Structure formats: structure tokens, C-alpha cells
Image (spheres, rainbow, N blue to C red):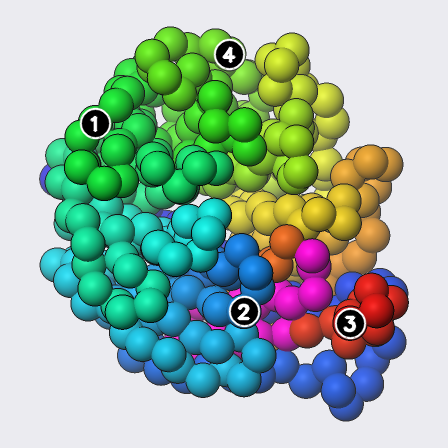
Amino acid sequence: MTTTPRLAALIPLFLLPAVRVGGDLKPLELDGHPAHVWCLAFAPDGKQLASASRDKTVKIWDAATGAEVRTLKGHAQEVLRVAYAPDGKRLASAGADGTVRVWDVGTGECVRVIRAHAGWVAGVAFSPDGARVTSASADKTAAVWDVNTGTRLALFTGHQAEVWGVAFAPDGKTVASAGKDQLVRVWDAADGKELHALLGHTGEVYTLAFVPPDGKVLASCGRDGTVRLWDVAAGKERNKLTGHRAGVYTVAADRAGRLFSASADRTIKVWDLAAAKELATMPAAGDEVYAVAVTANGHRWASAGKERAIRLWKDPQRLSRAGE
């Protein structure tokens, strides 16, 4: 029997280098899940935050006040991943029960159950038009599904072990997947043809993120303690970001050209993508953290993990600089 992967071992995100330490930087603490939180995702407009937990639920929070909006129940086992549709009206969750569930954010109703895989589903992401979702599973496959009908549109076979991460490119034409076989694979989203097999990591690869806005660069992270930046069109490694002293479990990019990486070494690093340069390192505080998310504009970020509470941070100076 396949076991649920350890999705992340992270630490909370504190301060970016441009932010001065001050009392107004204290985070909101959102306490609602009675078990570990595996994943966080902000709505596209940054006004809501969704959390996926070992307690088999997804919770939706008001990102400004920290108030719990609603709890989504339906998964038979722990929920491993969550993602918003581009319009923010629907939410997809992936679970250890082998299903992908699609939810109406406004009502909390589950509008579609996709019995996607023969093993746990650890990755899920929407296409840019919101009409499809892609999933990654312990059954060694990734797939694309029609959100409205639940029909499988493409199946990606080629990984030799569990697939842990998946991402849709911003143009909707390609999907990237990665997992325990140490490879990042890029696929044609329509016909399932493999376009590139990207070799560089020397350990399993945990998560992926296409860098906004154009997705020409793909970021990946893994057990080898590195973050890799790939030229998607050429199928070649562009940069290797080193500095973590243990495996890197999550990467997230904002539209300001920054990448956030969270590691088992109990730090989170912020990188300048253009320069491939480290901007800041934040040390751990508290227990292991399994999830980190950043809004597209970088104004808010959130962290969560083993201690169950979600910490919601904002950058008031950045908001001021942006004229908000």
C-alpha cells in the first residue's frame, strides 16, 4: 500500500529585506484546523486564503481579517493540496482518498468529484481558463481533467515512481510534473506527449511553479536542497539556487520577480529571480511548517504546518509603495 508523502517541512516566513522590523509586522494567527495543515493557496485577488489539512477538510479564510469563512467537507482522508481557479469562484482539492474535488467558493458546495487516481493525489492545479485541472498521483501518473464533466482529457505516463508536484503553464499549452524519480517532465497538455525530461536534481522533486507572468521559466525544488530554474522552451537548466542545508519542499513566485523557497533546514529564503541571487534568509520559529503561499503581488504571505495554526503576514511598506 502506498503511503502519503511528506509534503513539506518548512518554517514560517517573517520579513523581506525591504521591510523594517516593527510592531505592525505581527502576523494574524488563524486557528481552526485540529491537525497539520499541508497546503495553503491564496485566491487570485488575494482576498481569501484556502488551507488543506490532515483533518480531511479545506478551510477558506478572509485574508484581511483572518476570519474563517467556511469549511469544506467531503474527502474521506487527509487533504494534501488545494488550488484556486483563475477567476477565484472555484477551488480544487486533492486528497489521499485518490479524488480531486471541485468546490463552489461562494456556497461551499462540492460541484464535482473526480475519482482521479488509484493512489493518493498530492498535486492539483487549474488551467489558465479554469476549464481544466491537472493532478499528480502516487500511481506514477499525472492527468488533465475537464472540470465540468470530470472527463479525463490527457494522461501523462513516464514517471517511474510517485508523482508529487504538478503545474499548468500560464498559456495552458503545457503541464509540468515531478516526483520521486528525480525528473521534471514537461508535457503537451492536449495530447499527453512528453516534450522534455529535465535532469538535474539528485533527489526526489517535491513541487513546481511556473514563474509569472509568462511562464517561460519553471522553478522546481527537491530533496537535494536546491532550487532549479528551467528554460521551458529549450528544456535546459538556467540556474541552480543553492544555500539551503537540507531538502527544499516548496517554491512560490510572485509577480515582483521574487521566488520563495522553504526548506527542511528550518529556513525560508527569498531570491531575486533575474539575478539568481539570494535576498534574505529567515530562521525558524516554532515547529515544522509544511506550507507557504504568497499573493501574486507579494503583499501578503502565509505559513502553516505541524503546529496547526496558520500565520498570515502582510508587508505594509510594500503596500504603501504600490500606492494602496
Give the label, 4 or 2, closer to the camera.
Answer: 2
The quarter of the rendered structure image containing the N terminus is: top left
Give the label, 1 or 4, closer to the camera.
Answer: 1
Say whether disc 1 or disc 3 marks the residue closer to the N-terminus: 1
Image check: 200 left or right of 62? right
The front one of 224 and 58 is 58
Gap between marks 3 and 2, in whole Å?
Answer: 14 Å
Residue beneath label 3, please? 324
Which residue type does callout 1 highlight? Arg
- Image coordinates of residue 39 in percent, x first then y, are 42, 58
Which residue type does callout 2 highlight? Lys
Say whether disc 4 or disc 2 marks the residue closer to the N-terminus: 2
What residue is at 12 percent from the left and 59 percent from the top?
76
Which residue type does callout 3 highlight? Glu
Residue beneath label 2, please? 47
Say whether disc 2 or disc 1 marks the residue closer to the N-terminus: 2
Q: Is residue 305 magenta?
A: yes
Region of the chain picked out in magenta, as a range: 297-313
What residue is at 30 percent from the left and 53 percent from the top?
93
The front one of 276 and 130 is 130
Residue beneath label 1, please? 152
The answer to whether residue 237 is above or below residue 28 is above
Residue 265 visible in image: no
Gap between marks 4 and 2, in whole Å?
Answer: 36 Å
Give the label, 3 or 4, closer to the camera.
Answer: 3
